[in-house]
Amino acid sequence: MLDVTKIRADFPILGRTVYDRPLIYLDSAATAQKPQCVLDRMDWVYREVNANVHRGVHYLSEQATQAYEDARTTVARFINAREREEIVFTSGATMSINLAAYAWGSGLCKGDNIIVSELEHHSNIVPWQLLAQRQGVEIRILPFKNDGSLMVEKLPELLDEKTRLIAVTQASNTLGIRPDLESLIKIAHANGTLVLVDGCQGAVHGGVDVQALDCDFYAFSGHKLYGPTGIGVLYAKRALLEAMPPFMSGGDMVASVSFAGTTYADVPLKFEAGTSNFTGAIGLAEAIKYLDTFDMAEVERHEQILLRRATEGLGAILNLTIYGTTPDKCAIVSFNVEGVSAYDVGMILDKLGIAIRTGQHCAEPVMQHYGVTGMCRASFAIYNTIEEVDALVAGVERAIKMLG
């Protein structure tokens, strides 16, 4: 089993206190904490090799460029992309999905349609709505059941010859539900439909093999993967990237510029306009290397133990409802107590040093499905302990008593 005490020592922030209490951080689905090796690696970039990548022939620029491109190789290996050129660095999953919606979506026409699952984060809904407004594309919704499971069996009813893409999460940021993507992608491809997967939670909880999954696009963010903020990845099959026009224009995405016309750089640089967040990319690669030191099956086992403990403890509380109850969940549990505001529960837990997420979790359609205005969400990571889960349950019980 994992040595969680040793792991926690790798994360400096976990040693701090909040309101004179030890920090219990249960909000990793929003952003995970960073190990010391990631902080050190980014510090090294700024102290030793800080220079713009792809721009200079001097020593610092060449070192920074090499580290940046090595990071691309590390990410490609992490998700098992066929080629490193299928990895586009972005500012995060939100930009990755917007890039796909704008660049790939520019080829869609009025009468085409896109299917979006009801489970999605706003960043996998709104870009497609904007595309629909720009180009007359229809948005169709693939619903989920009350237990959180996505109704993949309804997909054939929604698909037709004009369905160009399905946008779906690998793991719900609110419910932790992991849809049956293998079946969904097979059905989609049999119809000639592409699939974009939001992998923000999936990349860190269970990981992904994009070749085995056979998705066409895959987006994730570094900051949920124990890496820096402001860095993300769009994976796309090379043929798609080759066919897509640029999303942004400027330096580094061009091959040649004149007032007579411009030619674009080869992929993936065609989609990386301007000065890239090379420090973030290098930090993300370091986070991946950190995860490589663990057996990911053991990580998954540890997180499932925490999830079961939380589910059993919270589930025993009178009038508490847990949302999303399918067995194959990742380590996220969202809940409400009847007659008690989620925000009030979150504020009391905060005073106990326990950080959870409250609100709509950027997934308002999920809230509408259940008829609630918000939820409490606890999300677990490699550094969390059974004792912290027990403290969460006790904290919720205390909040209920205080709130009457």
Image (cartoon, grey):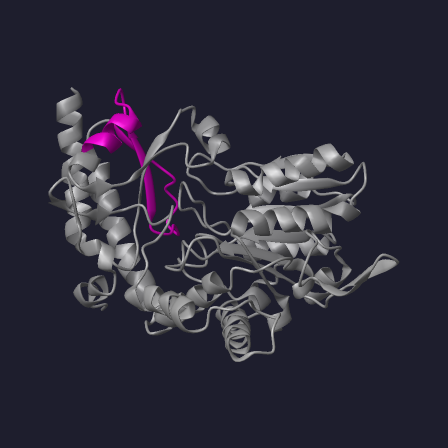
Q: Which residues are magenta?
A: 320-348
> As drawn, is 97 to the left or to the right of 315?
right
Q: 263 or 51, which lies in front?
A: 51
Q: Is residue 169 visible?
A: no
Which one is in front, 88 or 152? Answer: 88
The quadrant in which the C terminus is found is top left
Q: Is residue 327 magenta?
A: yes
Instruction: Tell me the quarter of the picture where residue 225 sits.
Output: bottom left
Residue, far right: 260
Give x and y (percent) for residue 241. 70, 61
Which image quadrant for residue 345?
A: top left
Residue located at (39% from left, 52% from top): 328
x and y percent of residue 145 in the render? 48, 36
- Look at 60% across and 73% down and name the residue there: 56
In the image, is residue 236 above or below residue 193?
A: below
In the image, is residue 67 above or below residue 309?
Answer: below
Quarter of the image where the N terminus is located: bottom left
Task: Answer whether residue 49 is magenta in the image.
Answer: no
Residue 112 in picture, x, y percent from top left: 77, 40
Relative to residue 106, is residue 300 drawn left or right?
Answer: left
Residue at 38%, 71% (x, y): give it. Answer: 44
Depth check: 283 or 123 in front?
Answer: 283
